Image (cartoon, rainbow, N blue to C red):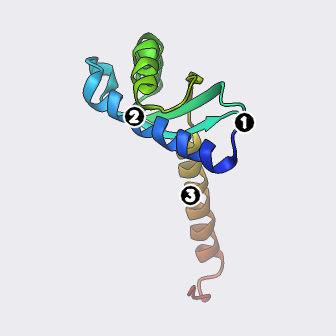
């Protein structure tokens, strides 16, 4: 079991290295609009998840997931080179839909504010 500070340091290093690999080392045209959003490791540092998001449609998302599955071993080895640990966590790629959810919530708030303005035109907002 690693302490929280060490776990966060390793997560940060994994995030940096995975993003660098996707940007500069993976020679696949499907890796162009991929963003590593966060990394979560289990407390024992044996398993973890790399969360990613990508621009485009659902088809682009599936192509990106396939590309990450194909490049997972390569990226895992590149991460292992820079980590200063005895073992390297087994990393799984997970799509992060928090950006889409935030966009949906933002649009709902905008709609509610617009509706409120039509119902109460005399009220001024700060």
Q: Quadrant of residue 1?
A: top right
SS of the residue under disc 1 = loop
x, y percent for residue 52 = 49, 33
Mark positioned earlier in the residue sequence (1 or 2): 2
Res. 43 mark:
1
Whole-Å distance between the Cαs marked 1 and 2?
A: 20 Å
From this viewpoint, is residue 66 visible? Answer: no
In the image, 110: left or right of 60?
Answer: right
**x and y percentages locating residue 124 in the rendered image:** 57, 88
Mark with earlier residue (1, 3): 1
Q: Secondary structure at mark 2?
A: helix
Residue 60: horizontal and vertical position, in percent? 40, 23
State which tag comes first along the sequence, 2 or 3. Answer: 2
- What residue does disc 3 label? 106
Residue 77, compared with residue 22, is above or below; it is above
* Foreground residue among 61 and 88: 88
Give the image location of residue 121, x and y in percent.
59, 83
Distance from the alpha carbon under mark 2 to that under mark 3: 32 Å
Q: Residue at position x 60%, y 29% from top?
A: 49
Under tag 3, what secondary structure?
A: helix
* Numbered disc total: 3
Q: Residues within 10 Å of mark 1 (few under 14, many from 20)?
A: few
Q: Indicate which label's residue lies in the foreground, 2 or 3.
A: 2
Q: Which residue is mark 2?
A: 17
């Amino acid at each position: 079991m690693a302490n929280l500070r060490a776990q966060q340091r390793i997560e940060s290093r994994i995030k940096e290295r995975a993003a660098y690999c996707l940007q500069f080392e993976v020679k696949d045209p499907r890796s162009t609009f991929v963003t590593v959003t966060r990394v979560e490791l289990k407390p024992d540092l044996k398993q973890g998840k790399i969360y990613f998001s990508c621009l485009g449609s659902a088809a682009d998302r599936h192509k990106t997931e396939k590309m990450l599955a194909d490049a997972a071993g390569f990226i895992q080895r590149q991460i292992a080179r820079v980590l200063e640990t005895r073992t390297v966590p087994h990393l799984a790629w997970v799509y992060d839909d928090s950006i889409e959810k935030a966009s949906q919530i933002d649009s709902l708030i905008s709609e509610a504010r617009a509706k409120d303005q039509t119902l109460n035109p005399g009220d001024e907002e700060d």
